[in-house]
Structures are given as structure tokens and as C-alpha cells.
Image (spheres, rainbow, N blue to C red):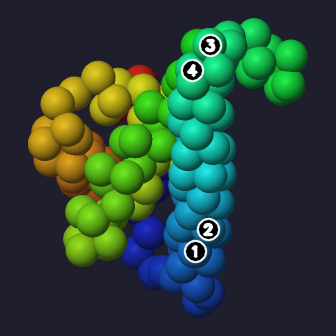
Amino acid sequence: MAELTVIPKGLGHCADRIRTAQQKAQRSFADYVETVGGELEKAQRLLADHHAGFGQWVKDEFGWTHQQAWNLIRAAGTMRLLSTVVESKSLPLPSTESQCRPLASLPAEDVPVVWERICEASEQTGKPITAAVV
């Protein structure tokens, strides 16, 4: 790809709008995961109190496997761990559950540190943050 010697008028505006759209998508995903994951956690506790099967309930109610529900619960926990560092350092949030999955397997105190490093590397290389990168 050729280097631009003259930046076309309006190009910066395009980049700003793309970044804004990315932030909205990330925030929407974060809202979805926080709500769904939180409600799944509540449902899991309610069903445990009644000795009922959580896995069967999510399958009957949503068509999800127990693993899909568990991944969403873990993603919600990961988002909670990231909320402080993301806001204080103006970092993006994970935009998919699959980006949260490897973070959820780390000790809680390491999650924000690792996410910050991933974001820094993405900014330096210009490459997007994918589940494979995480």
C-alpha cells in the first residue's frame, strides 16, 4: 500500500466516525453481555436453589448449550473486571464473547493488565483485536 503524501480532505473525519461506530458497537456488546451474563448468573442461582437443571433451562428457553451460557456468564465477569481500566485509560472494550474467553481463564488481577497490553499492541501495529490475538 502506498504512503499518502497528501492527506485527502475529510479523511480524518472518516476515521473519527469509524472509531465512534466501533466504540458504539463495543458498548452495545458490553451492555448485552453485562445484562445477559448477569441474568444468567441469577437464573443459575435460582435454579440451583430449586435443584433444577440450568443447562436444560437455557436449552429449552434460548436454544443455547450450557457451554454457551457459561461463556456469556464468564464474559460478563471479564467485562466487570475491565470496566475500571477501560474507563480510566480510554481503552476499547472487548467486542465479542470470544475475545473475553481467554481473558476469563486468567487470574482476576491479570485481566486488566493483559487487556491493556493487547490494546497497546493493537494501536502500535494498527491491527484489530481479534479473538486469536487475545
- In the rendered structure, the answer to whether residue 94 lies left or right of residue 8 reads left
Q: Is residue 129 visible?
A: no
Instruction: State which mark lies toward you, 1 or 2.
Output: 2
The furthest residue to the front: 50
Label whose residue precedes the other's in the sequence (2 or 4) = 2
Which of 47/6 is in front?
47
Marks 3 & 4, CB-CB < 8 Å contact = yes
**Residue receiving disc 3:** 51
Amino acid, disc 4: Ala
Which of 48/27 is in front?
48
Q: Residue at x 20, y 38 (%)?
A: 108
Q: Which residue is drawn at 58% across and 39% down?
A: 42
User: Please, what secondary structure does the residue beneath circle 1 have?
Assistant: helix
User: Please, what secondary structure does the residue beneath circle 4 have?
Assistant: helix
**Residue receiving disc 1:** 20
Marks 1 & 3, CB-CB < 8 Å contact = no
Instruction: State which mark lies toward you, 1 or 3.
Output: 3
In whole angstroms, how far apart are the C-alphas of marks 1 and 3? 45 Å
The answer to which quarter of the image holds residue 24 is: bottom right
**Residue receiving disc 2:** 24
Marks 2 & 4, CB-CB < 8 Å contact = no
Label whose residue precedes the other's in the sequence (1 or 3) = 1
Measuring from the top left, give residue 82's x and y in whole percent. Answer: 31, 54
Marks 1 & 2, CB-CB < 8 Å contact = yes
The answer to which quarter of the image holds residue 58 is: top right
Label whose residue precedes the other's in the sequence (1 or 4) = 1
- In the rendered structure, the answer to whether residue 25 lies left or right of residue 102 reads right
> Badge 4, how many Cα within 10 Å: few under 14, some, many 20+?
few
Q: Which residue is drawn at 42% across and 27% down?
A: 101
In whole angstroms, how far apart are the C-alphas of marks 1 and 4? 41 Å
**Residue receiving disc 4:** 48
